[in-house]
Image: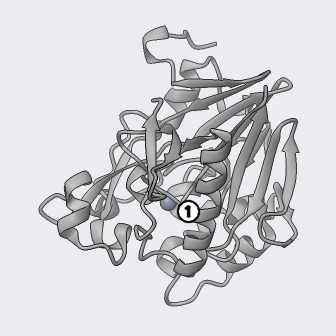
Amino acid sequence: MKKTNPATLPPCLTLGDIKVFSLSDGTIRLDGGAMFGVVPRALWSKTNPPDDKNRVLTAINPMLIQTEGKNILVETGMGDRWDEKRREIFVIKREENLTKSLASLGLTPEDVDIVINTHLHFDHAGGNTVEGPSGGLRAAFPGARYIVQSGELACALEPNERTRASYRPGDFMAIKEGRRFDLVERGEVGAETEAAEGVFIFRTGGHNSDIQLVKITGGGRTAIFLSDIMPMSAHINYPYIAAYDLFPLETLRVKKALIKKAAAEQRYLFFYHDPNLRCATVSLSEKGKPILKKLF
Ligand SMILES: [Zn+2]
């Protein structure tokens, strides 16, 4: 068992008997224009200053949920299967990483019971697999089932010219072949499936047709893991919708519904990609503008 250093413990939220930790798998840099869509650079650069190649700092913050003695990991981060060229393109920095985050909680990859991939893009599922001793890829969390929407796996297996750059077969083929996926059959948008006590997944569409978000409910409070529906805190503003999204108007509709409910119920919102804010609540101004209040 690795030693726990209290100074490096990840931030934690308690919902009744459920604990929610925000972990880190380091940072990358993504094109600011792609991240903020139709919003002009003059606006988004105020909150997210770009570097000389127009890239904005993008955090990778997976979540660990502990409920009923189970460890549930939401997203597996970038992983470390990256060649030099792409490390440079994305400025991948992983001094902080998922393995260290888990170790700070006294956990190893073997302790994870369930992995939830909101979708299979490389920055969400990049740590799904690791190289085994004989060179082939194997599940990085050998005791875990991996929950993903069946439609998302189908899209990942047959990408097109627009979607191909987001998927790496190495992130999911070994999981599929090892029969470790728990595939959620495509239901209505918003229909919830319980993954564990107090932990629900629901498909939204928007970013792509089969992305799913995570809802955690306990002690009368609810937290939502926003994945790429609102990747950063700036995306709380309605026009901020990533150009990566395949169905931006669907994203807008989902965002409005999520924000309205979050404001009414004082829900906790978890941002996967924001380098400065991981968890916040939201309220609406008199004019209906969403305003975030940072927790950590
Ligand atoms: Zn992402």
In the rendered image, the quadrant that contains the C terminus is top left
Q: Nearer the viewer, residue 166 or 130?
A: 166
In the image, 293: left or right of 147? left
Tell me the residue that label 1 is attached to: 229
Q: Residue at x 61, y 70 (%)?
A: 169
In the rendered image, the quadrant that contains the N terminus is top right
In the depicted structure, whether residue 268 falls above or below residue 213? above
Q: Position of residue 22 (x, y in %)?
A: 55, 33
In the depicted structure, whether residue 190 falls above or below residue 77? below
In the image, 129: left or right of 174? left
Q: Position of residue 256 (x, y in %)?
A: 58, 64
In the figure, residue 209 lies in which quadrant?
bottom right
Q: Could you tell me if residue 142 is visible in this image?
A: no
Amino acid under disc 1: Ile
Q: Nearer the viewer, residue 24 or 17?
A: 17
Q: Could you tell me if residue 4 is visible in this image?
A: yes
Q: Secondary structure at mark 1?
A: loop
Q: Position of residue 38 (x, y in %)?
A: 34, 78
In the image, 276: left or right of 224? left
Q: Position of residue 134 (x, y in %)?
A: 63, 50
In the depicted structure, whether residue 45 falls above or below residue 159? above
In the figure, residue 104 lies in which quadrant?
top right
Q: Residue at x 69, y 67 (%)?
A: 204
* CB of mark 1 near ligand 1 (< 8 Å): no
Local crowd at mark 1 within 10 Å, few (<14), some, or many (≥20)?
many
In the image, 49: left or right of 6? left
